[in-house]
Amino acid sequence: MPIEVRKMANARTKVYIVAPFEPLRVGLANTVSTAPGMEVTGASGSLLEMAQSEGYRRADVLVIDVQSLNGGAGDEIYSRLKEWLPELRVLFLGSPQEALTISFESIPLLMRLNTVGFLLKDGAIDRIVQALRLITTGAFVCETDVIKRILTRLTQWASYSLTDSMDQLSERETEVLGLVAQGRSNKEIARDLFLSEGTVKAHISHIMGKLNLERRTELVRYALAKRLVPLTDE
């Protein structure tokens, strides 16, 4: 057997777990760590706690309980994860209802990661290990009910009714709006457009005023409705 193939066969899938409910977090860690070919590099109760650790930097797959996304603290971390760990894959755990708690603004950010799906957490815990094995082959794992809910939500999103006010935006503002919808943080937009973060914030404030919108999530919905977001980053 060639050396390269032997190394691949002996490789262990490294997993980092984020779950606020301690029994779930401990149970997942114990199950995954004892499964053949699996290794847990760490576990945290929140994304902010994870960001302060080093274990997730060695992970191949990040398992996130959707409850840890409450409060919106994850959006900035999402945007930075792609830069820090471009090959990291993400598997979400939650209930069908929790699948709807992922914000509109989070969706473009998640699309920039190698997100591999959503699994319901009310089933047998062994299913998580099975899903992780599929993920290592490049497979996408998602419950059928969740896919239906997401498609329904995206359909409602795409049909979001807005007045024709694109002509009110300058070329630069349209450019900034498109980057916001792609999940870029203000810092990233400033870097991409060679602007200061203060200037980016001012542009976003002016865009909201012109479009009569109050939240960044509404900007994302507007941009998608107006097809300002490319299908790929290429």
Image (cartoon, rainbow, N blue to C red):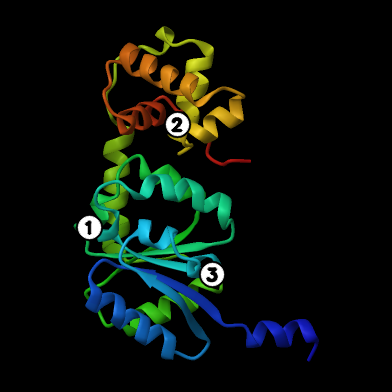
Percent x, y for residue 164?
34, 13
Q: What is the three-letter code of the residue carrying label 2?
A: Val
Q: Which residue is at a point 76% across and 81% down the rendered structure image?
A: 4
Percent x, y for residue 158?
33, 34
Q: Quadrant of residue 121?
A: bottom left
**Which label's residue is closer to the chain start, 2 or 1?**
1
| Disc 2 crowd, CA 10 A, few/some/many (<14, 14-19, 20+) | many
Q: Which residue is at a point 49% across and 26% down the rendered structure image?
A: 197
Q: Which residue is at a point 41% across and 45% down the rendered structure image?
A: 76
Q: Is residue 232 above or below residue 54?
A: above
Percent x, y for residue 220?
37, 32
Q: What is the three-letter code of the residue carrying label 1?
A: Glu
Q: Which residue is at a point 57% across and 54% down the rendered structure image?
A: 84
The residue to which callout 3 is attached is: 60
Do the numbered discs 1 and 3 sit on residues whose CB atoms are within 8 Å?
no
Nearer the observer: mark 2 or 1; the answer is 2
**Which dot marks residue 98?**
1
**Which label's residue is closer to the chain start, 3 or 2?**
3
